[in-house]
Image (spheres, grey):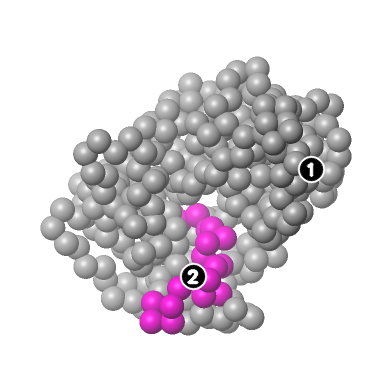
Amino acid sequence: MKAVYAARPDAEDPLAALVIGDRPDPQVPDGWLRVRTRSVSLNHKDLWTLRGVGLNHDKYPRILGCEAAGEDPDGRRVALYPVLESPPGTADETLLLPAAQLVGARPGTLAEYIAAPAASLLPVPDQLTWEEAACLICTWLPAYRMLFTKARLQPGDSVLVQGAAGGLSTALITLGAAGGLRVYATSRTPDKRELARRLGAHAAFAPKTRLPEQVDAVIDSVGRATWTHSLHSVRTGGTVVVAGATSGDVSPARLHRVYFHQINIVGSFSGTRDEYARMLALMHTTGIRPLVDDVMPPQDARAAFKRLLDGDVRGNLVLSWP
């Protein structure tokens, strides 16, 4: 089958490791299904794989891709949930990661076919395009969890999203506005701040700008570059949700401000099946959809990943199989 894969790790030039070519068809164990891939949303985790972050050399060649939408053998529209299995009584499947991880521990989704446990295939509403459906699991579901589970935000509450244009940021802004939140966002460029406002942000500011109010929660996936601003922007007793560290780890942590203002700092990763169902319900009642910047064929994967690497993305970049 045709696939987009990393032939080897290359920390200096990750795109040099990218190959578009043939790979063996996936094996389908008992209880698993073969899915025909229709669309795959690109993720920064794919760049980590190309660089060799967290993977031994014996894990290569390695098919890229973290999420996908496609059709099961009965023609049902499905999205790939990342947890292999959930033991009875498990209320939060995300706490099983990475031990029970489907994508990451096994070949990725950027291929004509993927294999997955039947229980890991979640339904996709008919109203969504394949390209929109490809953004649900690794972008929109984590965003929903950050806002409404981890930060426990309610209609009328306020939130700051550090960043305005990437897949996660646009999902946070769109979901937050649809959920009745007062959303603020930051971005370095005027066009990205305007995008945030179009998506429903109450206001958008340059980085490190003092907000009109201290917010109930901050969602920070940037890390070092925004950490101090996040701690100064959240109200006493508020919550900072840590969802990544794209600019590097935090140093110093400013612990005096954390304890004096009783700031809750929580990590967030992925999302549960129940959260997925609640997210789909919100999407259905409000009509919101993922922002897809561009749809490209798999043979243009190198150009697509170059855009991701350069930060030249507004929302999600998607590769679609014919």
Left or right: residue 190 compared with residue 280? right
Q: Foreground: 19 or 85? A: 85
Q: CA distance from mark 1 to mark 2?
A: 29 Å
Q: Looking at the image, which residue is at 44% across and 58% down? A: 66
Q: Which residue position is annotated with label 1?
A: 229
Q: Looking at the image, which residue is at 32% across and 72% down? A: 1
Task: Count all numbered tags in the image, as a single digit.
Answer: 2
Q: Which residue position is annotated with label 2?
A: 54
Instruction: Give SS at disc 1.
Output: helix
Instruction: Name the amino acid, label 2.
Output: Gly
Q: Quadrant of residue 202?
A: top right
Q: Was residue 58 drawn as part of the magenta stretch in this picture?
A: yes
Left or right: residue 22 compared with residue 30? right
Vertical order, 311 against 241 (above or below): below
Vertical order, 69 against 28 (above or below): above
Residues shaded magenta: 38-59
Q: Looking at the image, which residue is at 75% across and 41% down? A: 256
Is residue 151 something one can see in this rendering? yes
Whole-percent x and y of residue 311?
69, 60
Q: Was residue 86 drawn as part of the magenta stretch in this picture?
A: no
Whole-percent x and y of residue 85?
26, 49
Q: Foreground: 20 or 9? A: 9
